[in-house]
Amino acid sequence: MVYSSTLAGTRWQFDSLADLLAKASPARSGDHLAGLAADSAQQRVAARLALADVPLRQFLIDWVVPPEQDEVTRLILDQHQPAAMAPVASLTVGGLRDWLLSDAATTSALAALAPGLTPEMVAAVSKLMRNQDLIAVARKVTVVTRFNGTIGLPGRLSVRLQPNHPTDDEAGIAAAILDGLLLGAGDAVIGINPATDSARQTIRLLELIDGLRQRFHIPTQSCVLAHVTTQMQAIAAGAPVDLVFQSIAGSQAANQAFGISLSLLQEAHEAALALKRGVLGDNVMYFETGQGSALSAEAHHGVDQQTMECRAYAVARQFRPLLVNSVVGFIGPEYLFDGKEILRAGLEDHCCGKLLGLPMGVDVCYTNHAEADQDDMDTLLTVLGVAGCTYIMGVPGADDIMLGYQSTSFHDALYLRQVLGLGMAPEFEAWLGRVGILDDRHRVRPQLTGRGAELLGIAAA
C-alpha cells in the first residue's frame, strides 16, 4: 500500500508502511547506513504527517515483515488481544499519541492496554513524540516483576551489579561484587558476562555468586550471561541458575544469527521454571536488546532499526521476564552516532518497552569510538530516572574492562537515587539496613556490624 501526505504544496509518497516508518524516524546513523532514512528534514516531516493519519487497525493487516517469512511476526499476531485494544481501536497513530499524553492514560489503563498494542504501533507513535513526551508517557507506566526481590515498584531504581573480569578471575569478580554491595548495588541482579562461554566456566561463576548470596542471605538473584544453550547445560548439571539470559532481536533471521529460536527460548524458560528457585515470584528470564542488532546481522527486512527493536520486545514479553534492558549505545556509532542519537534511542527503547508491558532498564552506555562522553551519559541517566526507568547497570568505575565499553558506575546509581529520592527493591533495601550499609535515613553510609562486618572483612582481604 502507498501512503502519502502534502507539505508546502508538495505531494510526498511512501511505498510501504515500512518505508513510511523509516522516513518518519528521527535521524540516526544506522538507518542511513541501511539506506532507509529520510533524505531531508522536509521528507521526515511529510512522513510524520502521513504516519499520524494511519489508523491503528492498519498495523494488523499491513505487516512490515510478512508472517509467512518470520516467526516473530506470527508471534505478534498470536499475542494481540483485540479486547485490550478496544479503548484506542478507532484512533490513528496521531490520535494514540494524544491519548497517551491525556489524563485518560492512567497507570492502570496503560497496563490494560499493553496486550492490545503491537510493536509496530508503539514504534509508530514514538516517532511522533518529542523527548519530553517519551518521558511523560513512560513515567505513567508501572511494570512489577518478582523473583527473590521485587523489581519496578514506583519510586524505586534497581541496579544490575556487573562485576565482569577479562580473565574471569574469581578474586577480581568477588571484589567487584563486594564493592557494589557496599555501595548499594545489586538488587536487580548480580550478573556476570563471562570471558569464556563454556558450561564449566558458567557453573563456576554461578557457584561463586550463589555462595556469596547464600552466605549473607542477600535477597537478589544471580545470572551468568552465557549463551542460553550453555546455561541450559548448566541447569542440566545441577548448577544454581536463578535467571536465564539471552540477547534477542526483532526478526527470526536476526535471532538465528544469535543462535536462538522461539522454541529454544521456550525450552529454556520451562527449564528455569522447573528449578523453582524464586522466593517471591517466577519471572525467570533476563533479556537484552539494542537498536541495530538486526541490521548488523543483515536481518532487518528493510525495516528501520527502532521498529525492529520494538519487535524484539514481543519476543521478550512472551516469556514474562524479570528484567529487560536495551544496551543502547553498545553496538557502536555505525548505528547510533553520537550522544544525541544515543539519548533519543534510550528514551524510545525505555518508553516503547514499558508500553508493551516490559520491566525496562537501560544500559546507559557508549563505545570509545562514538561521538559521546560521560556528560552525555549523565544526561541520559538523569532523564531516564525522571521517566521511571526500572534499572541501570552498576560497573566498577563505569568502565567495563572485559567488554571494553563505558557504562554507569555504582556511584552514578547513588547520584540518581539521591537527587530523585528513589529507593531500592524493598527486600534488598531492608537487607542493606540490617547489615549496616544503610543508615536510618536510608543513605549508603556503611557502619557495619555482625554479618556486615564479616562482609567488610572479606572485602578488605
Image (spheres, rainbow, N blue to C red):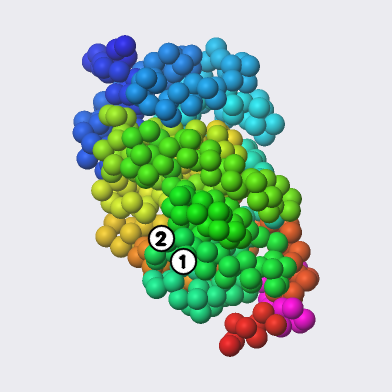
445 drawn magenta? yes
Q: Residue at x 63, y 16 (%)?
A: 83
The stretch of residues the image draws in magenta is 441-453
Visible residue check, residue 247: yes
Return the x and y of residue 33 as percentages of the image width and height. 22, 40
> How far apart are labels 1 and 2 at the CA level?
7 Å
Query: How many numbered marks appear?
Result: 2
Callout 1–callout 2 Cβ contact below 8 Å: yes
Give the main secondary structure of the magenta stretch. loop
Return the x and y of residue 24 as percentages of the image width and height. 34, 28
Instruction: Work out whether 369 lies above or below 445.
Output: above
Instruction: Work out whether 42 lies above or below 372.
Output: above
Residue 197: mark in rendering? 2
Amino acid type shown at disc 1? Gln
Q: Quadrant of the N terminus?
A: top left
Q: Kindly state the secondary structure of the residue where label 2 is placed.
A: loop
Q: Residue at x 36, y 57 (%)?
A: 366
Amino acid type shown at disc 2? Asp
326 drawn magenta? no
Q: Residue at x 74, y 74 (%)?
A: 435
Q: Which residue is mark 1?
A: 201
